[in-house]
Image (tube, rainbow, N blue to C red):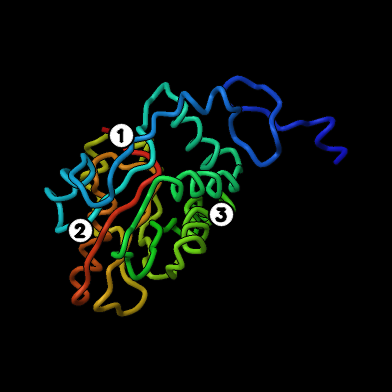
Amino acid sequence: MILDLFFPNRCIECSRIIDTDLLVCSLCFEQIHFTHFDYFSENIIKEKCRLLFPVENTYGLMKFEENGLSRKLIHELKYKSRENAGKTLAEWTVERLDFKDEKPDILVPVPLHPKKLRERGYNQLHLFTETLSGFYQIPFDHELIERNHYSKAQALKDKKHRLEAVNPFSLSKPISGKHVLLIDDVFTTGNTVSSIAWEILNAGDNKVSVLVMAVDA
């Protein structure tokens, strides 16, 4: 395409020209610190979640590092209108995550407030979730959880204000007897997924697992 000639796609780390469907070049790809977590085994996400709510299994694709490539990848996805980055991150996930014979029943991404969704134009987790859904053949529901309050991005809040959030989420419909896999971009304190998890757990005989693009540990 003509646009590719004048505005070629470049690696977000080193600016080398790369194929249009890539985020980083092959050399910079080697700098990404993948966690190599086992979904069923102990890991830092599971340890933190267990302090907040009963969790089944947990997985994080990358280690979130303030000055690392993982942060740039998430930033491109959330703030640079690179929605398709979610598809790439999902593809990296399916190469590493094996549910074996214990797939969850439904994939549920953390929602944006409608105002934030209008501002950004997309939920950064939707394409990621849909790509996982297609590969694993697990249904997804973007509407199950509603965000009740409009607020600054979690990354822009200090820890005190993150902990002060009260009932930020609610269920839009009944759910019972399901194993729900909650999906978020970055796991920090665990308060966001905990708030959603308790809504799901209190709704019926449900179980909750967690999957994130990156873990800040």
Indicate the quadrant containing the C terminus: top left, top right, bottom left or bottom right: top left
- Is 216 on the left or on the right of 68, as rendered? left
Q: Residue furthest right?
A: 2
Question: Which one is earlier in the sequence, the residue at label 3 or at label 2?
Answer: 2
The local secondary structure at tag 3 comes to loop
Q: Are marks 3 and 2 in contact (CB under 8 Å)?
A: no
Give residue 176's quadrant in the image: bottom left
Q: Which residue in the protein does label 2 denote?
A: 56
**Could you say where residue 142 lies in the image, as x and y percent from the top left?**
45, 66
Neighbor class of circle 3 (other Cα within 10 Å; few <14, some 14-19, many 20+) is: some
Q: Nearer the viewer, residue 89 or 147?
A: 89
Mark 1 residue type: Asp
**Can you say whether 86 is above or below 139 in the image?**
above
Q: Nearer the viewer, mark 3 or mark 2?
A: 2
Q: Which residue in the protein does label 1 denote?
A: 216
Q: Which residue in the protein does label 3 denote?
A: 122
Q: Residue at x 47, y 63 (%)?
A: 133
Give residue 3's quadrant in the image: top right
Q: Residue at x 33, y 64 (%)?
A: 103
Neighbor class of circle 2 (other Cα within 10 Å; few <14, some 14-19, many 20+) is: some
* Label 1 – label 3 distance at C-alpha: 24 Å
Q: Nearer the viewer, residue 162 or 193?
A: 193
Q: Nearer the viewer, mark 2 or mark 1?
A: 2
Question: Which one is earlier in the sequence, the residue at label 1 or at label 3?
Answer: 3
**Could you say where residue 158 lies in the image, as x and y percent from the top left?**
29, 34
**Could you say where residue 2 lies in the image, as x and y percent from the top left?**
88, 38
* Label 3 – label 2 distance at C-alpha: 29 Å
Mark 2 residue type: Glu
- Is 215 on the left or on the right of 199, as rendered? right
The local secondary structure at tag 1 comes to loop
**Can you say whether 67 is above or below 112 in the image?**
above
> Can residue 141 be seen by looking at this rendering?
no
